[in-house]
Amino acid sequence: MTFVLSIAGFAAFSQNYLYKPVKLHVNQKKLGNVLEDIGRQAGFHFSYSSGIIRSDSLVTIRNFDGDVKTALVTLLGNGYEYQQSPNHLIIRPAPFRLTLMPEELGEGKRVYTIKGYVVDEKTGVGIHNASVYEKRLLVGTLTDKKGHFKLKLKTKSAGPMVLTVSKELYKDTTTVFLPTVELGKDANKKGHYGYIGDGEEEVSNTALARLFLSSKQKLNALNLGNFFAYTPVQVSLTPGLSSHGMMSGQVVNKFSANLIGGYTAGVNGVELAGIFNIDRYHVRYLQAAGAINMVGGNMSGVQLSGIYNTVIDSLKGFQAAGIFNFVKNSTNGVQLAGIANYTEELKGVQIAGVINKTRTNRGLQFGFINIADTSSGVSIGVVNISKNGIKRLSISSNEVLYVNAAFKSGNANLYSILSTGYGNWKGSQIFTTGFGLGHEFRRKNQANYFAFELVSQQIHGAAYENVSNWQKLNILYNYSLGQKTKLFIAPSLNFLTKNRQIIENARDIPSAGYPYFIDKERSKLWLGIELGVSFF
């Protein structure tokens, strides 16, 4: 004989935040501030969507001395349920209640077949697409249009079966099926499960999830929310064909092997896939895929893919992709990509073949183009753009060129220089193209200051042949003429090497009779000077 025990909103924790004592006495205070005060007294943080809790509404509660749950019911009413994760209490809307009605209970040797209906407690109407699952065994299903379900459960020991029903906007209900008692049998061990994350996960709403996940998997994730379980191993062909079946999105694995692609709650070990990995929450240690990796929480360790990596929270470790890396929040480590990298805050290194972008750069960027809204780090590239940095155009003249134009971008720590110039040697027109790096020796808002620049230039003749390579070391003194205009003078040390193939066509540089430190057929070393003005 099998007995049934139903518990609405059942949850068990070794330390339940809902029953911790709090004291409140507030008058017309914002609800968000009152919730912060409750969390501070009870030692946790609340997590909720701004769309369901109006945190700016004013509340009054006087001389309250009770537990967290009573305080929440007083403030919010009965239309919510609460899920506990480490250091967080998650508030979810649950204005309705449901009931699991067993229709048929089949009990074999360590095998249960359970059929029944999930109905609305008030109307008695069957509920479509409700998730019915056994947390310990990680077996589940969805109800049909009439609210009917059928679930077959296999267990190695004759312990109770605990079915939980979850549906968005309904309070979770748990039903315990007690089997026939067999004396002398070992009690069933408690499963390792709980709640993960501190709010709504974002993976299910991405284009990748819409492409590879079935509607049933997304509905199941919506119903079960932050519930998860730990298992050692998961093997899958695709997200729908997995050793954990429809519950794969609720499982954190130590090892996950996905022939084509996999969908899990997270990984605390190693995850490998032929094409793609999709993880709703955190991944630790190693994740590798032939094409795409997606992590909905934090990535701690090494993440490798042939095309694209994305982390919807933060990265601590090493991330490499053939084309593009994306980290929504902070990166404390290395991003390496064939084309582009993005992170909200960089505390490590970005290396890309084309472009690196971050809002806050506190590390090193190395790429053709580097972009940062604010930067206190270093950017090395042909073009470095920073809202609080250097974007400067300078016009100058020196002993070799009539006119030289340069665009400087980056910040005071390190800026790049793109230059071009025009001159005339004894009736022959020449022009130059060059690239360099510079550093400014100045304090914040200092008007006049020194700078150091190292520039490499190619000198071309009228027929565009490469006549000479010209290296310059400039020491600039910048004198402010206004907020965006500076006059500068720059003594320079110059070293020139002539092209072997056209030595006979090369003219004396800067001019015949100029005082050189080194004056050889193929190389020259001399001191020069440059005068100019810079804008912006």
Image: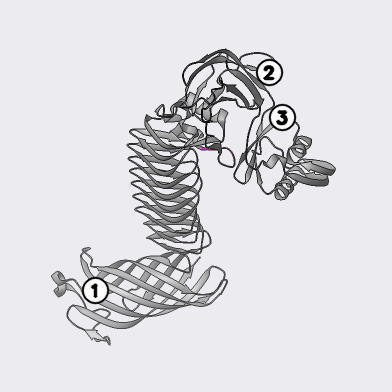
**In this picture, is 102 found above or below 232?**
above
Q: What number is the disc on residue 241?
A: none
On the image, which quarter does residue 481 sit in? bottom right
Residue at 70% of width from left, 39% of height from top?
A: 18
Q: What number is the disc on residue 121?
A: 2
Q: With 177 as the anchor, is 38 left or right in this view?
A: right
Determine whether the residue tagged by mark 2 lies in a helix, strand or loop: loop
Is 168 or 342 nearer to us in this picture? 168
Label 3 sits on what residue type?
Answer: Gly
Determine whether the residue tagged by mark 3 lies in a helix, strand or loop: loop
Q: Which residues are magenta?
A: 198-202
Q: CA distance from mark 1 to mark 2?
A: 97 Å
Determine whether the residue tagged by mark 1 lies in a helix, strand or loop: loop
Query: What residue does disc 1 label?
Result: 427
Q: Magenta residues: mostly which secondary structure?
A: loop
Q: CA distance from mark 2 to mark 3?
A: 14 Å
Q: With 12 as the anchor, is 109 left or right in this view?
A: left
Q: With 533 as the anchor, is 459 left or right in this view?
A: left
Is 211 or 216 nearer to us in this picture? 216
On the image, which quarter does residue 293 sit in? top left
Look at the image and tell me whether residue 449 can be seen.
yes
Labels 2, 3: front one: 2
Q: What number is the disc on residue 79?
A: 3
Residue at 13% of width from left, 69% of height from top?
A: 501
